[in-house]
Image: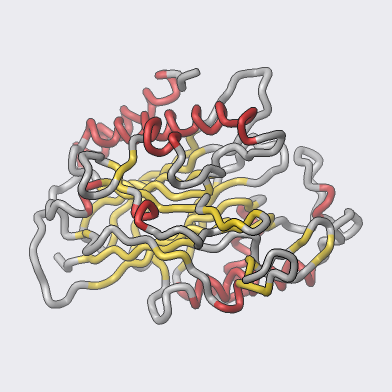
Amino acid sequence: MMPSPKTLLPFLILLLFWFSQSVCCQFRASDTDTIAGIMFYNVENLFDTRNDPKKRDDDFTPEGVRRWTYSRMREKFNNIGRVILNAGGWNLPVLVGLCEVENSWVLNAMLRETGLDNLHYRVIHYESPDLRGIDVALLYRRDRFKVYESRPIPVDFGPNERPSRDILYVKGVLDQSDTLHVLVNHWPSRFGGAAVTQWKRQYAARLTRQISDSIRMVNPQALLIIMGDFNEPHKSDLFIKDLEVGLLEDDAWLISPALKIPPGVGTLKHQHAWEIFDQIIVSRSFFDGSSPIYMSEPEMRIVSLPFLLERDEQMGGVKPFRTYVGFRYAGGYSDHLPVWIDLVVTPQ
């Protein structure tokens, strides 16, 4: 099943318009380069405490089975804020892709509660048709990233299938330098069985590829960032064959820095095994010298700060320090670890 071309037509028209308005930038070396950190984080069920009759969020209310109270929500806010403030050392991320967030209200409340709004962070979020009410979103620093366009792109399997999260598309200019295209993903879950549900993730992979091709068709040197929790191992055929990612030394246009990460580490842990379900993929344009925004190396870092981990008493080693273990409140951060890349920006 392939995504309908009708889904992408309005998107392509908008791309053509914006590209016709843009100014091409030339790469040049500089001693005053700055770093722009890009981060993605599955925050594990960031809900408000109110019952929304249009969503299956009953568990995440004070009366629900998880006893999701205002104080627990505030603790979650502070946990997420702590991660954002510490993930890059002294370098605050310019863009933070998020998934498993309920709505714009809870994100803006988190920014206010943690003081991140005073650090120029703002929210891009659209309600998606996901039945649980968990969406993707992008936090951005408005002092460094000027947004020109954003829109949700539906991942539509048809009327008889459970709807999934949208893909969030954002276009903006980083540090008054060059344009970034950003896709924030949360591909369909493996609930019900990985094999049974794989066709849905394959659909999402092919749709993501179509969007990527549309961006590249308008501008072959476009700077594209694809981030998300893909619910699929990073070396899966869905990436290699359907999304067509590769290494820098390959001919691929989409480069997956995660492919160079050695075994034994990951962004989540299933029993004794670590997996990389969360990653950031970038276009080759970040490495060809065509833009003042570039990556010096195709490197992605898994953020494994000590406070994000706890001892794994059953399987040994460590595991992510979760907010909930089943229905038991643990008070941790998330069942996933964040991922991070550094972009280098040459001033214009």
In the visual, does 322 lie left or right of 83?
A: right
Residue 142 in sight here: no
x and y, in percent, of residue 185 in the image = 50, 44
| Residue found 40% across the figure and 19% down from its top | 5
Residue 348 placement: quadrant: bottom left
Q: Which colour scheme is used?
A: secondary structure
Front position in the image: 31 or 232: 232
x and y, in percent, of residue 287 in the image = 19, 54
x and y, in percent, of residue 138 in the image = 49, 54
Residue 137 in sight here: yes
In the visual, does 181 lie left or right of 80?
A: left
Front position in the image: 111 or 342: 342
Front position in the image: 94 or 199: 199
In the visual, does 109 lie left or right of 204?
A: right
| Residue found 42% across the figure and 74% down from its top | 88
| Residue found 84% across the figure and 48% down from its top | 58
| Residue found 26% across the figure and 51% down from its top | 179
Front position in the image: 16 or 253: 253
